[in-house]
Image (spheres, rainbow, N blue to C red):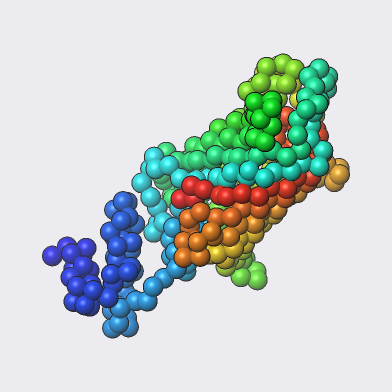
Amino acid sequence: MSKQKAVLLLALLAGGAWADEAPLCVREMDERLRLACYDALHQRISATGEPPKDQPQSLAGGESGTSAMSRVWELDPGDKRAPFSARSYQPNFFLPLHYSSDINREPSSPTHPARVSHPKYRSFEAKLQISLRAKVAEDLLLPGADLWVAYTQRSLWQLWDARESSPFRSTDYQPEVIYVVPIPAQIGKLPLGWNWRMLQLGFAHHSNGQSDPLSRSWNRVSLGAGLERGDFSVQVRGNQRVRLESKDDNPDLTDYLGRGEINLAWLSGKSTLGLIWRSNFQAFDRGSLQFDFTRPVFADQPAGLRWYLQLFHGYGETLLDYNHRQTSLGLGLSILQF
């Protein structure tokens, strides 16, 4: 008898007491994760002699006792999923209520003085973001190291300006390649209960798809590290701009957007908090701060639809605004978390 059949037989002998939890294993499409799910159930009932109690589902789709960073980036063997499965990357959200303190009506750069003016743009608009990724290679060059591709699209939409046909004010496009290396547990142990979980090496192209004089773009390579302690995580990343063309629409871009960022997150399983600081580490009046807060719309579905609050202050909320300072507040929903 196979291991999966044996575990299912034990569930039946338990009088169907696994009915609320075993279907989670049945619905798992990845064979390795499905078997790991059954193994976990079998180990708990073998140790206690009683059916397991309901376990809350985490934001990343795993059980609450596992590492959030490992589930997101598949760092541990038990968190590996099949390649070429689309997953969320950065938050996917729709903020129909988005207010800017100083909307950019005359965008400019050193190579493109302000030639286009939009005096009728309204401070109230909508902001939306779609961000997906997929693993394309496993165990590449190093044990457990994976190669990912990702795509993020962010737009500011004059949704409430029906008189002007509700135009999209700005849209950014960002494809990326990310190489993720898990850090072995014996190396990653840090003081105060922190763990160094991963290294990331990436390349990204970031542009707004506009023609002159509104064209903005840049390429970067990045090196980052991820640390974790319980529900808290820290990701640090440094960026190096790469000039692939002689033409440069925004030569001073990194002076405003920064040369690196620190991303702090608290993932409790219900409410989540995030803080992103971007800086060039020279002029601290540049860069930006972004605060994100989410909470489930339905308390029993923490991985489902969530309320989303975002506060941004500084430069570069979009690429067109890279040298324009503003404070904005958005409220809406996050979607497609998987």
User: Please, is residue 172 above or below residue 87 in the view?
Assistant: above
Residue 180 coordinates in the image, percent (x, y): 52, 46
Question: 14 or 161: nearer the eye?
Answer: 161
Q: Residue at x 57, y 50 (%)?
A: 333
The answer to whether any part of residue 312 appears in the image is: yes
Residue depicted at 23% across the width and 74% down the height: 16
Q: Quadrant of residue 217?
A: top right
Q: Quadrant of the N terminus?
A: bottom left
In the image, 100: left or right of 57? right
Residue extending farthest to the front is 163
x then y, percent, for residue 112:
80, 18
Left or right of 153 in this view: 31 = left
Q: Residue 315: percent from the left, percent from the top? A: 78, 39
Q: Is 130 on the left-hand or right-hand side of 134?
A: right
Which residue is rendered at x = 79% and y = 35% of the image?
A: 103
**Whether residue 204 can be seen here:** no
How many callouts does the rendering have? 0
Please tell me which residue lies in front, 108 or 247: 108
- The residue sitting at the left extreme is 1
Side of 276 relative to 94 (left or right): right
The residue closer to the viewer here, 52 or 271, is: 271
Q: Residue at x 50, y 61 (%)?
A: 298
Toward the viewer: 43 or 170?
170
